[in-house]
Amino acid sequence: MTSWQLQTAKARFSELIRTVKSRGPQSISLHGRQEAVVISMRDYRRLKKGGSNLADFLKNSPFHGLDLGLERNRTASRRVEL
């Protein structure tokens, strides 16, 4: 990922956008620290669309309902001296 200084990104904004479309995400730095990333609308929509939570992901998994034969260990806990 290419890093652009903020003042360069502002001065060459059209070029920055073309670069995002052709080469992917571009980083913007301010005072030597990376502060932002510019991504394409296509990438943004793809990232935004994948907003399911872990419970939904597991429910939609092809392994949902698969019996793994796991059992809980019901023995008493052990004593630990502190």
Image: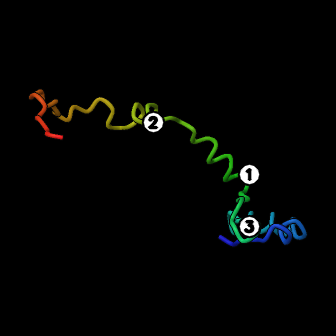
The numbered dot on residue 41 is 1
Mark 1 packing: few (<14 Cα in 10 Å), some, or many (20+)? few
| Image depth: mark 1 or mark 2 in front | 2
Give the secondary structure at mark 1.
helix
The numbered dot on residue 29 is 3
Between discs 3 and 2, the one toward the N terminus: 3
Give the secondary structure at mark 2.
helix
In the visual, does 77 lie left or right of 15? left
Give the secondary structure at mark 3.
strand
What x and y, as percent, mark residue 64? 33, 32
In the visual, does 19 lie left or right of 8? left
Q: Quadrant of the N terminus?
A: bottom right
Who's the residue at 72% across and 59% down the image?
A: 36
Depth check: 44 or 11 in front?
Answer: 11
The three-letter amino acid code for the residue at tag 1 is Met
Residue on which the image places disc 2: 54
